[in-house]
Each structure stands twice: as structure tokens, then as C-alpha cells.
């Protein structure tokens, strides 16, 4: 009715999406995919503990990590790639994510993966790369909490190498080390120790991981490991500043294809475009030194990828659907869309920060044009497409209801207490005509075909199954777009809980949130949160009351009131003059608390 009214009045409907909400939901997906013992702060309430004996048969603690997609296998290669991209987003778009008060959730999503990788890296040259058997897992349709399938664990070592898997895991840990450095330096240092060891292992004992873990072949076959070795070395150079790793990518640029491969895909299997753009950063910032000539060759291939996505590559472009979506592969195409859009958003940053532009065969492209293209792909995902369908589950008025996902399609263990057996799940839940009982918020499904056609069918796994690889790039994308196109103070809700805002329209104060320190106690990480309350109006403010939700730790600097979750300024600071500030701090583990204004005079 609102749309009709707007049309009748000759007013256009809002063209921008709430990217902040989309970001929040994308992070929720990672909570839904958690394996292991779930924390008290878990926001996806229909999930329970699972996989608590993973690795027990092998005498290794492999509890934790993420389930890959709609199944319950923990595949190391796509999981590590997803953590790398989450970390890259947290690095490149740190301010944007922090401004949305999502840095805590983002770091938590990263740490759920990196904690698992540290466990899986039991010796310098041993990495456990998979838990669960894909074949037997796919024969069953059951909740993670009810799993009866094999939980066998598979590793790579000196006799059974996997340079691609070890290399990608090294990249993930190195990227995460950079992301965590401002908040937890000791954890960052620990991540780097493992990253360096894994890179050395990957480089010295070369081979394809799926030759060693044959169980992965029909699910995540690797096309090669040279790109992962370059990728890991590039990330280690950025994380350490050590010239050894920069020299590695330069010396091996030709032999390993870094300066030779011109690609039109960036994915869990093919990292060439990623390493080419990452090394372009070194060149653009003037840090290439004597390696500039080779890094220019890397950048030429980065330009090829970007130009191909923008359809400016002299005909050698990435295919697009009639509706304007990049189309790379028939099976789960959206993961290639999100990864390409993420790379272009990052490259746009690199170019604009160094006052450079993209030189394509079909003309010069300004960094802003890259972001406009990123927006077009994100908007397609969120509903601006021929089907008027949001392919991000839980976002917007119309999204897939029959998602190919075991946990989402079966009633929660907290509402249906009886075990759902392997075949019973197919009979009772997989084949049922009703929509899934649980909404797996933030899952990016496989999406439409090359003609923009989409069938919302639980058995249509090519189009309706969400993956870690698809959702990981979205965090950075949505943070960047919200900073550019979102409304200041734009709010949204999830299960009735307001997401914190930097500044509410008409409100006289803004909240500036930062993490000043962190430490580990008994395996748990705690953060010291510092919040500045600033009067941005031209008048004094008195009797300011704040609502603080999701606060599990101790708070200093505010006085509690008789109302639940409500605090006021201390007696000595009852009036906040124009431009003045008041600071409070609190300590807790997990994500940050949510602060909002209740009342003021």
C-alpha cells in the first residue's frame, strides 16, 4: 500500500537498502553454523550444542569450528577461506563495522574459526582438515544436535601433504592476526606463530589436500595449490612486514602463476584475483621498493579481474544475467558474486586512498564506479532483481522459505525434544510442503540461474543452499555500503532487540564505542569496552537516561536506576554541556552491549 501511495503521489520509493540490517543478519548466519559448545550469548536460539566428541576417536580435540553449508561436515578449505575474508573485511572496513557497533560480533565470528584452526594444528607439520564424512552425512537429514553419522577426522602431514589447505589456513590466521592486533595483541601473536608454521609446512611438503583427504574430492576438489602459497605469503607479509614473504611472491610470481593467470573468478578454490589485488596495495602505497616491476605485473592482472567484472575488458568479461547479476557458475553462483563484489570494494579503497584509477581496455574507471557496481550486486542480492526476491534469508519482505539446510528445516531441539533419526528427517521434514520452521538469517542461498530464474525448493540445493563462502564477504560489503548510502542512525530489530545506533535522528548525543584492552582467562577472552557519550547539540542536556542491553559484565561510570537495564549519568555529571563528553566503561566477553537513549531533558 505504501508503494501504491508513493506512486500515486509521484514520489519514488526509497532506493537504498538497510545494509546495516543485512550486515547483522550475515553475522547471525555464522552463529547458526557453529559447531561445538554454544556460548550463553548465542543469538540463534533454535541451535544447540553439537559435535562435542569431534576428534575423540583420533585422540584430538576438534570440537568447534563451523559446519560448511546445509550439512554437518567441517570442511577445512572453505572454512579457512571464509575466515580469511571475514578478517579482510574487519581489517579493510574496520571503521565502518565499528561505526555500526558490529566489531565485537565480527571478531567473535573470526575467533570461532581461528580457535578451531589452532586446535586442528596439533604439530608444526600436522593439520586436521576435515571432520565428518560427506557421503554418509548426505544420506541423512537430521539436526546437528542429533547427529548419528560418522564423525571421522582427516589430517594432512609430511607423508600426506596439502599445500592448498595448509596455505589457506595460514592466510586465515595471518589475516586474523592483523584484525585482532588492536584488541588482543597476545592472541594476534599466537595466530601468527601458527600461520608461519603452516606456511612453511605448505611450502616444504607440496601436494593437493584432496589427494591426502580423498573424502573431500567430490565436495571441494582443489584445482591447485600455487595460488594458496602466494596468498598465504602475501598475507604473512602484511601481517609481519617481513621482506622474506614479499620476495617469495616476487620470485615465484611466474612459476606459480601469480603474474601470469588472468582470472574472472575469486573463490574458495581460486585465490589469484585476491592475491593480485592484495599485492596491488603494496605497490600503490609505494612500499614495493626493488620489487615494483613484478608487482606491476600482479596489478595488471588485478585490473583484468576488475575490468572483466565491470564489462570493460574488451569483450573478455564476466557473464551477467539479464537482470545484471554476475554469473560465474551454475551451482551456487551467489558465492562468486559476493566474493567478486568484496574484492572490488577493497580495490576501490586501495585506489581511492592512493589517488589512483582503474585502467581498463574500454576506458579509465574511477574508484567510485567500482563501488557503484558493488552496490548493484548487493542490491540484486537484497531484492532489486526480476524476482523481487531477497536471496539473503531473513532480509526483506520476500526471501527463500524452503532453504536446503538440515537444522533450519527441522523443528528446533528446544521445541521438538525427541530425536529426529537419519531417514525420519527425510520422510517427515525434507519432503514436507510447509516452509522451514527456523529462519536461517543471513544465509546467502545459491541464487538464480543465468536467466534470473529461481525455484524456492528444498531439494533444489544448487539454488537454495547457503554456504560459509557466500556469506563471509558480505560483512565487509554491507559495512562499506551502509557508510556510503545508509541513513545515519538507521535502526532495525532482530527478535525484538534493537541494534545500537551511532546517532539517532533528532537525538542530541552520539556514542563512540571502542575496545581499549583485552585478556584471556581460562580460555575465554574478555574485552574492556570504552564508550564516549558526546553532546552534539547546541543546548545543555540533563537527566539523560540510557538503556543498555546484553550487558553481562561489570560497568563503571554510570549509575543504575530502579528501571531494568536503565542507567543515568553520575550525580557529579548531571548536566552535559554542548560539545562535552562523558565516558563509561564495562568489561565482558563476547560481543559488545547495545546502548540507546531512553529519555533526556
Image (tube, rainbow, N blue to C red):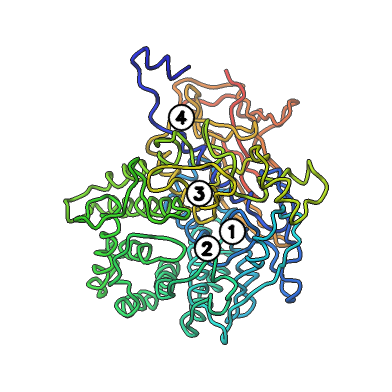
Q: CA distance from mark 3 to mark 4?
A: 52 Å
Residue under label 3, please give it.
463
Does the CB distance between marks 1 and 2 fall below 8 Å? yes
Q: Position of residue 218 (x, y in %)?
A: 54, 68
Q: Position of residue 143 (x, y in %)?
A: 72, 52
Q: CA distance from mark 2 to mark 4?
A: 48 Å
**Number of other residues with Cα within 10 Å of mark 1, as a class: few under 14, some 14 to 19, many 20 or more:** many
Q: CA distance from mark 1 to mark 2?
A: 7 Å
Q: Left or right: where does residue 398 sit relative to residue 427?
A: left
Residue under label 2, please give it.
78
Residue under label 1, please give it.
68
Which residue is at a point 72% across and 71% down the rendered structure image?
Answer: 55
Q: Nearer the viewer, residue 112 or 36?
A: 36
The residue lying furthest to the bottom in this view is 159
Which residue is at a point 77% across and 54% down the rendered structure image?
Answer: 421
Q: Position of residue 101 (x, y in %)?
A: 54, 41
Does the CB distance between marks 3 and 2 fall below 8 Å? no
Q: Position of residue 209 (x, y in %)?
A: 53, 76
Which residue is at a point 27% across and 61% down the rendered structure image?
Answer: 284
**Number of other residues with Cα within 10 Å of mark 4, as a class: few under 14, some 14 to 19, many 20 or more:** few
Residue under label 4, please give it.
579
Q: Earlier in the sequence, mark 3 or mark 2?
A: 2
Disc nearest the viewer among 2 and 4: 2
Does the CB distance between marks 3 and 1 fall below 8 Å? no
The residue lying furthest to the top in this view is 9
Q: Secondary structure at mark 4?
A: loop
Disc nearest the viewer among 3 and 2: 3
Amino acid at each position: 500500500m505504501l508503494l501504491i501511495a508513493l506512486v500515486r503521489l509521484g514520489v519514488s520509493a526509497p532506493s537504498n537498502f538497510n545494509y546495516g540490517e543485512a550486515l547483522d543478519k550475515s553475522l547471525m548466519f555464522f552463529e547458526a553454523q557453529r559447531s561445538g559448545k554454544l556460548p550463553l550469548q548465542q543469538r540463534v536460539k533454535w541451535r544447540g550444542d553439537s559435535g562435542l566428541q569431534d576428534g575423540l576417536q583420533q585422540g584430538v580435540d576438534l570440537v568447534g569450528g563451523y559446519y560448511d553449508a546445509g550439512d554437518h561436515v567441517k570442511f577445512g578449505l572453505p572454512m579457512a577461506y571464509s575466515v580469511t575474508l571475514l578478517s579482510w573485511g574487519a581489517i579493510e572496513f574496520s571503521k565502518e563495522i565499528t561505526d555500526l557497533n558490529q566489531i565485537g560480533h565480527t571478531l567473535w565470528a573470526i575467533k570461532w574459526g581461528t580457535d578451531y584452526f589452532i586446535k586442528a594444528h596439533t604439530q608444526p607439520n600436522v593439520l586436521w582438515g576435515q571432520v565428518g564424512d560427506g557421503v554418509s552425512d548426505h544420506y541423512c537429514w537430521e539436526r546437528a544436535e542429533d547427529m548419528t553419522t560418522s564423525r571421522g577426522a582427516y589430517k594432512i602431514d609430511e607423508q600426506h601433504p596439502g599445500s592448498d589447505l595448509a596455505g589457506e589456513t595460514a592466510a586465515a590466521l595471518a589475516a586474523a592476526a592483523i584484525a585482532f592486533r588492536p584488541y588482543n595483541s597476545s592472541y594476534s601473536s599466537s595466530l601468527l606463530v601458527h600461520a608461519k608454521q603452516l606456511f612453511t609446512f605448505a611450502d616444504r611438503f607440496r601436494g593437493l589436500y584432496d589427494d591426502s583427504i580423498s573424502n573431500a574430492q567430490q565436495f571441494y576438489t582443489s584445482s591447485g595449490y600455487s595460488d594458496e602459497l602466494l596468498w598465504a605469503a602475501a598475507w604473512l607479509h602484511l601481517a609481519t612486514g617481513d621482506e622474506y614473504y614479499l620476495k617469495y611472491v616476487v620470485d615465484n610470481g611466474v612459476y606459480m602463476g601469480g603474474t601470469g593467470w588472468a582470472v574472472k573468478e575469486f573463490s574458495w578454490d581460486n585465490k589469484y584475483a585476491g592475491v593480485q589485488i592484495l599485492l596491488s596495495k603494496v605497490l600503490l602505497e609505494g612500499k614495493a621498493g626493488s620489487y615494483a616491476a613484478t608487482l606491476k605485473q600482479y596489478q595488471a592482472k588485478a585490473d583484468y579481474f576488475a575490468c572483466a567484472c565491470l564489462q570493460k575488458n574488451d569483450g573478455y568479461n564476466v557473464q551477467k544475467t539479464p537482470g545484471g547479476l554476475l554469473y560465474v557458475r551454475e551451482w551456487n553462483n551467489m558465492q562468486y558474486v559476493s566474493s567478486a563484489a568484496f574484492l572490488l570494494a577493497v580495490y576501490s579503497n586501495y585506489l581511492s586512498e592512493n589517488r589512483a584509477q582503474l585502467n581498463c581496455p574500454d576506458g579509465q574507471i574511477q574508484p567510485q564506479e567500482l563501488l557503484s557496481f558493488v552496490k548493484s550486486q548487493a542490491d540484486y542480492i537484497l531484492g532489486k532483481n526480476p524476482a523481487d526476491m531477497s536471496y539473503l534469508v531473513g532480509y526483506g519482505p520476500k526471501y527463500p522459505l524452503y532453504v536446503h539446510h538440515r537444522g533450519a528445516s527441522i523443528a528446533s531441539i528446544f521445541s521438538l525434544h525427541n530425536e529426529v533419526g537419519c531417514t525420519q528427517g527425510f520422510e517427515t521434514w525434507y519432503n514436507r510442503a510447509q516452509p522451514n520452521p527456523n529462519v536461517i538469517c543471513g544465509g546467502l542461498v545459491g541464487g538464480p540461474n543465468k536467466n534470473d530464474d529461481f525455484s524456492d525448493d528444498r531439494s533444489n540445493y544448487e539454488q537454495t543452499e547457503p554456504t560459509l563462502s557466500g556469506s563471509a564477504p558480505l560483512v565487509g560489503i554491507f559495512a562499506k555500503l551502509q557508510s556510503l548510502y545508509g541513513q545515519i542512525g538507521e535502526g532495525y530489530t532482530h527478535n525484538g532487540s534493537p541494534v545500537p545506533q551511532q546517532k539517532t535522528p533528532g537525538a542530541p548525543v552520539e556514542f563512540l564505542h571502542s575496545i581499549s584492552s583485552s585478556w584471556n582467562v581460562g580460555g575465554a577472552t574478555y574485552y574492556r569496552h570504552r564508550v564516549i557519550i558526546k553532546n552534539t547539540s547546541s543546548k545543555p542536556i540533563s537527566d539523560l537516561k540510557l538503556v543498555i542491553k546484553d550487558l553481562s559484565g561489570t560497568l563503571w561510570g554510570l549509575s543504575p536506576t530502579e528501571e531494568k537495564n536503565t542507567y543515568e549519568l553520575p550525580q557529579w555529571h548531571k548536566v552535559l554541556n554542548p560539545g562535552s563528553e562523558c565516558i563509561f566503561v564495562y568489561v565482558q566477553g563476547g560481543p559488545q552491549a547495545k546502548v540507546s537513549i531512553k529519555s533526556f531533558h
